Image (cartoon, helix red, strand yellow):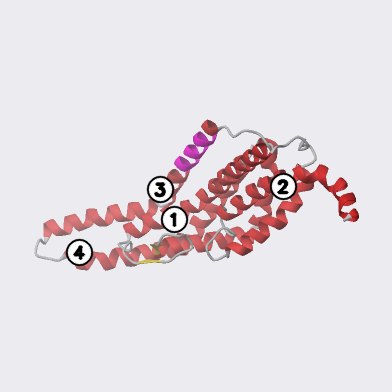
C-alpha cells in the first residue's frame, strides 16, 4: 500500500492526459472507419480498432505536448472527445466521397447498358450493380498499391494544423465544404460516364428510326443485346483510362483536402 501511495504521487498529475489521448483515438478511429481501403466491410472492426489504437500512439507525442491538459475537467474532457470525433468523421467521409465517384459511374453505365437489374453484395453496405462493384474493388486496390494508407496518415496528421486539438468545429464551413465536394463528385461521375451516356443516346435514336421504318419488328429484342455487347466492349477498352482519370482526380482531391 505504501508503494501504491507513493506511485500515485507520480501518476495523479498525468491522469487528465487520458482525455486528450482518447480524443486523438476518437478522431483516428472514425477516420479509419470511413476512409477507402481499411474502412471497407472486408476489414473487420477489430482490425480497424487495433490499427487506430496503434496509430494513435504515433500521433500522441506529436500532438499532445503543445496542449495544456493539466486543468481539464470531466465535462471539458468529454467535450474534447466529441469535437475530435466530429473532425474524424468529416475527414473520413470527405475521402469516402471519392469512392462514390466509381459507384455513380458504375450505376450510370449499368443504366445505359441495360445491366442495372443484376445487383449483388459489394464492398459497401448497400447492394450495387455489377459494374459499380467491379470499379470500386479495382479502385480500392489501386489506392492500396498507391500507398494510400501512408497518404491517409499524412492527411490526418496535417489536419491538426488546420483543426488543432481542442478547437471548436465550424459547422458552417464543414457543411459548405462537404456540399462542394459532393457537387464535385457528381460532376466528375457524369463526366467519366459520358461515353456510356452518348452510346445510350445514339442507341435510342437509331432504335426510334428503325421502329418508325419497321413498326412490326420487335426492336427491343434486337437492340438490347447490341447495346449490351457494344457497351461491355467500350467498358473493356476504356476502363483503364477511366480508372487513371479517377486516380488523378483522387490525388488532386486528397492534396486539396487539407489546405
* C-alpha gap between disc 2 and disc 3: 42 Å
Instruction: Tell me the residue at 66%/56% (across/down).
Output: 52
Q: Are marks 2 and 3 in contact (CB under 8 Å)?
A: no
**Earlier along the polypeptide chain: callout 4 or callout 2?**
2
Mark 4 lies on residue: 220
Q: Is residue 37 left or right of residue 230?
A: right
Residue 7 screen position, x and y as percent: 88, 51
* C-alpha gap between disc 2 and disc 1: 36 Å
Mark 2 lies on residue: 21
**Earlier along the polypeptide chain: callout 4 or callout 1?**
1
Label 2: how many Cα within 10 Å (few below 14, some 14–19, many 20+): some
Quadrant of res 169: top right
Task: Kindly identify which numbered label has been placed on residue 190.
Answer: 3
- Callout 2: SS: helix
Q: Please name the predominant secondary structure of the magenta segment in the image.
A: helix
Q: Is residue 213 above or below residue 75?
A: below
Q: Is residue 184 or residue 61 the one in the foreground?
A: 61
Residue 195 screen position, x and y as percent: 38, 53
Q: Are marks 4 and 2 in contact (CB under 8 Å)?
A: no
Amino acid at each position: 500500500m505504501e508503494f501504491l501511495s507513493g506511485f500515485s504521487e507520480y501518476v495523479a498529475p498525468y491522469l487528465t492526459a487520458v482525455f486528450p489521448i482518447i480524443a486523438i483515438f476518437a478522431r483516428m478511429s472514425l477516420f479509419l472507419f470511413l476512409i477507402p481501403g481499411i474502412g471497407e466491410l472486408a476489414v473487420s472492426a477489430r482490425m480497424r480498432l487495433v490499427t487506430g489504437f496503434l496509430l494513435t500512439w504515433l500521433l500522441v507525442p506529436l500532438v499532445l505536448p503543445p496542449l495544456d491538459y493539466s486543468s481539464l475537467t470531466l465535462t471539458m474532457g468529454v467535450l474534447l472527445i466529441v469535437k475530435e470525433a466530429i473532425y474524424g468523421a468529416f475527414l473520413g467521409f470527405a475521402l469516402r466521397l471519392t469512392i462514390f465517384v466509381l459507384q455513380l459511374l458504375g450505376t450510370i453505365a449499368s443504366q445505359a447498358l441495360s445491366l442495372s437489374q443484376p445487383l449483388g453484395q459489394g464492398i459497401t453496405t448497400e447492394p450495387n450493380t455489377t459494374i459499380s462493384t467491379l470499379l470500386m474493388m479495382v479502385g480500392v486496390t489501386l489506392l492500396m498499391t498507391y500507398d494510400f494508407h501512408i497518404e491517409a496518415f499524412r492527411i490526418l496528421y496535417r489536419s491538426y494544423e488546420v483543426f488543432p486539438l481542442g478547437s471548436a468545429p465550424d459547422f458552417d464551413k464543414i457543411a459548405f465544404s462537404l456540399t462542394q465536394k459532393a457537387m464535385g463528385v457528381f460532376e466528375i461521375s457524369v463526366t467519366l460516364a459520358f461515353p456510356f451516356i452518348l452510346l445510350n443516346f445514339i442507341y435510342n435514336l437509331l432504335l426510334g428510326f428503325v421502329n418508325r421504318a419497321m413498326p412490326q419488328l420487335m426492336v427491343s429484342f434486337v437492340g438490347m443485346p447490341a447495346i449490351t455487347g457494344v457497351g461491355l466492349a467500350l467498358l473493356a477498352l476504356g476502363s483503364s483510362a477511366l480508372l487513371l482519370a479517377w486516380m488523378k482526380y483522387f490525388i488532386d482531391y486528397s492534396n486539396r483536402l487539407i489546405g
